[in-house]
Image (tube, rainbow, N blue to C red):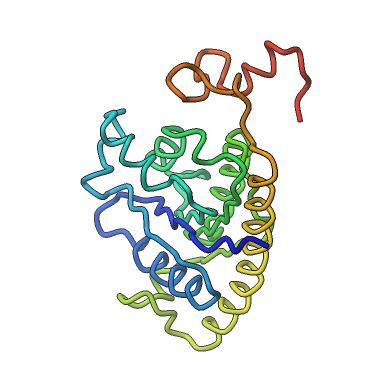
Amino acid sequence: MTQGNRIVVILGSIREGRINDRVAAWVAGQLSMHGFAPEILDPADPDLLHVQIGDQAAVARLRQRMAGADGFVIVTPEYNHAEPGTLKTLIDSVTAEWWARPVGLIGYGGISGGLRAIEALRVILAELHTVTIRDTLSFASPWRRFDAAGRITDPDDAAAAEAAMAVFAHRLRWWADALADARVARPYDRPDDEDADGHEDDGEGGGTGGARSAAGAGGA
């Protein structure tokens, strides 16, 4: 069986003073403890920041960093019942890099703990041919829970979060290995899934949704 170890951890916020770094540091540390090789992808990185305005060189760097990953974990705040707009732009900037990969979702925020952002992302990521992990982690008021180094300060909170992360990591491992084996056995994409530039059609038909309509197929 393939061991899907390379997991790209995508931060959801680019705001100054964000707590995203603390939560993502904890997540990356936990993933390492469970045998993964996490890599942080920060949309505020100067090499990637211009993805937000469609700069093609920045988008090419984003594709390069995501290419060949065994899976992804998105660590995001919730803004107004949804994911941050900058995260949505980053997600929409690439296509094939997402295909047939598992995506784990970890949210944080106020009393909701980012759960509404997580559920909003599931619809988006389904359209990009990913498999989102059913199990999630959610942190309410993380500014009270994490220190500057990304450690959970309360021992009981830490134990509960680590137990939830053990389940999350187990599911992520299962899907990463299963999908890696499936991609080896049979390529996910077909020649007519991509246009001449090697990117999925993003015309007014809505990407893959448009392709389904043209083929006369029903929704999945």
Q: Position of residue 184 (x, y in %)?
A: 64, 47
Vertical side of 170 occupied by 132: above or below: above
> Image point 63% across, 60% down: which residue?
2
Vertical side of 8 occupied by 54: above or below: above
Q: Quadrant of the C terminus?
A: top right
Q: Quadrant of residue 134?
A: bottom right
Q: Residue furthest left?
A: 46
Q: Position of residue 112 (x, y in %)?
A: 56, 58
Q: Quadrant of residue 133?
A: bottom right
Q: Residue furthest front?
A: 185
Q: Position of residue 152 (x, y in %)?
A: 44, 80
Q: Nearer the viewer, residue 74 or 172?
A: 172
Vertical side of 127 occupied by 185: above or below: below
Q: Position of residue 79 (x, y in %)?
A: 44, 46
> Image point 50% across, 14% down: which residue?
203
> Image point 41% across, 64% down: which residue?
24
> Image point 56% across, 76% down: which residue?
161
212 to the left or right of 66: right
Q: Nearer the viewer, residue 4 or 140?
A: 4
Q: Nearer the viewer, residue 36 or 169?
A: 36
135 to the left or right of 46: right
Q: Quadrant of the N terminus?
A: bottom right
Q: Quadrant of residue 93?
A: top left
**How many numbered marks does the figure carry?**
0
Q: Nearer the viewer, residue 22 or 139?
A: 22
